[in-house]
C-alpha cells in the first residue's frame, strides 16, 4: 500500500528526513545529560529508529528496515556529528527542530499504520502500531536518559494524541476505501498541525477527575 501512495524514492526521502529530525532531538537530550559522544550516538539512533524497529519486529518485517538500509542507520550518526560540534547553534533553533519533529510525527504515524496494515494487522491494531511508530523512539530515549517518558507526563504538551488522530484517519480511509496520496497527506498534516497547536497553546491531556493527592508533584 505504501508503494501505491508514494514512489520508493519519495518514501525513502521522507523516512530519512523524519529519522534525522528525531535523531537531533535524541542527541540534544544526550548533550543536556552530559553524555559522551558514544552516548550521544546511541540516544540519536534509539530515538530515530526505535519506533520503526518496534513496529517491524511486531509485524514480522525481518530483518527490520533499520538494518537493511544503510541510509537509515547512518542518518542518526550524521545528526550526532551535527549536534556534537554545533549543539549551541542547534539549541538556538530549538523551535525549528520541534517543528520538524512534529512533521516527522505526522509522517511516521501514517507510514507506520499503512505498513502494519500491509502485513495483515486489523484496523485497530494498525492504528495502534502507527502511533507506536511515531512515539516509540521518544519513549526509549527518555528511558535510557533516566527520565519519565514525556509521553506519560501531565506537564508536557500533547504528543501521542496527534499521532493517534493521524493514525485513526488513515485506518478510516482504509475502511472506506478512500486512502490515497491526498488523504494520507491530509492525515499527516492533521497530526502535524495538532502537534503545533498543542505546543503553541500548551494543550495537555486531562488528569484524573476530582483528583485529591497528598503526594507532592514534581
Image (tube, rainbow, N blue to C red):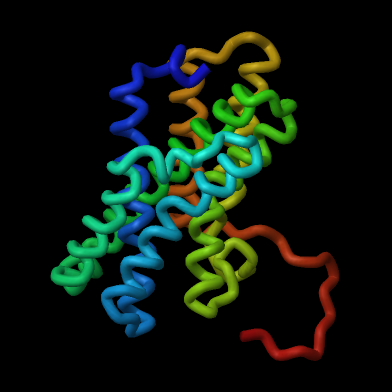
Q: In which quarter of the image is residue 123?
A: top right
The quadrant of the image that shows the C terminus is bottom right
Going 46% across and 44% down the picture, which residue do you hit?
A: 105
Extreme residue toward the top, this view:
177
Q: Along the line of sight, which residue is nearer the eye, 201 or 37?
A: 37
Query: Residue 109, relative to residue 31: is it above or below?
Result: above
- Image coords of residue 77 (percent x, y): 26, 58
Going 28% across and 63% down the picture, which residue do you hit?
A: 94
- Image coords of residue 104 (percent x, y): 40, 43
Q: Along the line of sight, which residue is nearer the eye, 12 or 104?
A: 12
- Image coords of residue 145 (percent x, y): 48, 76
Going 48% across and 48% down the picture, which residue do you hit?
A: 195
Q: Along the line of sight, which residue is nearer the eye, 46 or 94?
A: 46
Give the total of numbered labels.
0
Query: Residue 158, relative to residue 43: is it above or below?
Result: above
- Image coords of residue 147 (percent x, y): 54, 77
- Asked whether, in this view, residue 210 is left or right of residue 197, the answer is right
Going 69% across and 24% down the picture, which residue do you hit?
A: 120
- Asked whether, in this view, residue 213 is left or right of residue 24, the answer is right
Query: Residue 73, relative to residue 145: is it above or below?
Result: above
Query: Residue 7, relative to residue 113: is it above or below?
Result: above
- Asked whether, in this view, residue 192 is left or right of residue 163, the answer is left
Amino acid at each position: 500500500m505504501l508503494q501505491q501512495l508514494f514512489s520508493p524514492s519519495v518514501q525513502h526521502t521522507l523516512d530519512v528526513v523524519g529519522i534525522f529530525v528525531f535523531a537531533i532531538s535524541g542527541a540534544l537530550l544526550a548533550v543536556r545529560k552530559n553524555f559522551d559522544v558514544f552516548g550521544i550516538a546511541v540516544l540519536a539512533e534509539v530515538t530515530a529508529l526505535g519506533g520503526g524497529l518496534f513496529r517491524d519486529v511486531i509485524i514480522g518485517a525481518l530483518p527490520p528496515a533499520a538494518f537493511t538500509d544503510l541510509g537509515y542507520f547512518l542518518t542518526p550518526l550524521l545528526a550526532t556529528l551535527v549536534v556534537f560540534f554545533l549543539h549551541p547553534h542547534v539549541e538556538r533553533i530549538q523551535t525549528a527542530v520541534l517543528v520538524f519533529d512534529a512533521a516527522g510525527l505526522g509522517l511516521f504515524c501514517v507510514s507506520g499504520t499503512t505498513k502494519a496494515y500491509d502485513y495483515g494487522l486489523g484496523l485497530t491494531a494498525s492504528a495502534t502500531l502507527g502511533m507506536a511508530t511515531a512515539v516509540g523512539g521518544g519513549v526509549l530515549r527518555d528511558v535510557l536518559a533516566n527520565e519519565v517518558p514525556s509521553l506519560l507526563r501531565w506537564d508536557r504538551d500533547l504528543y501521542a494524541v496527534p499521532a493517534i488522530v493521524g493514525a485513526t484517519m488513515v485506518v478510516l480511509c482504509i475502511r472506506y476505501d478512500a486512502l490515497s496520496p491526498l488523504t494520507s497527506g491530509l492525515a499527516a498534516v492533521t497530526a502535524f498541525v495538532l502537534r503545533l497547536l498543542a505546543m503553541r497553546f500548551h494543550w495537555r491531556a486531562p488528569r484524573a477527575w476530582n483528583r485529591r493527592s497528598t503526594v507532592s508533584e514534581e
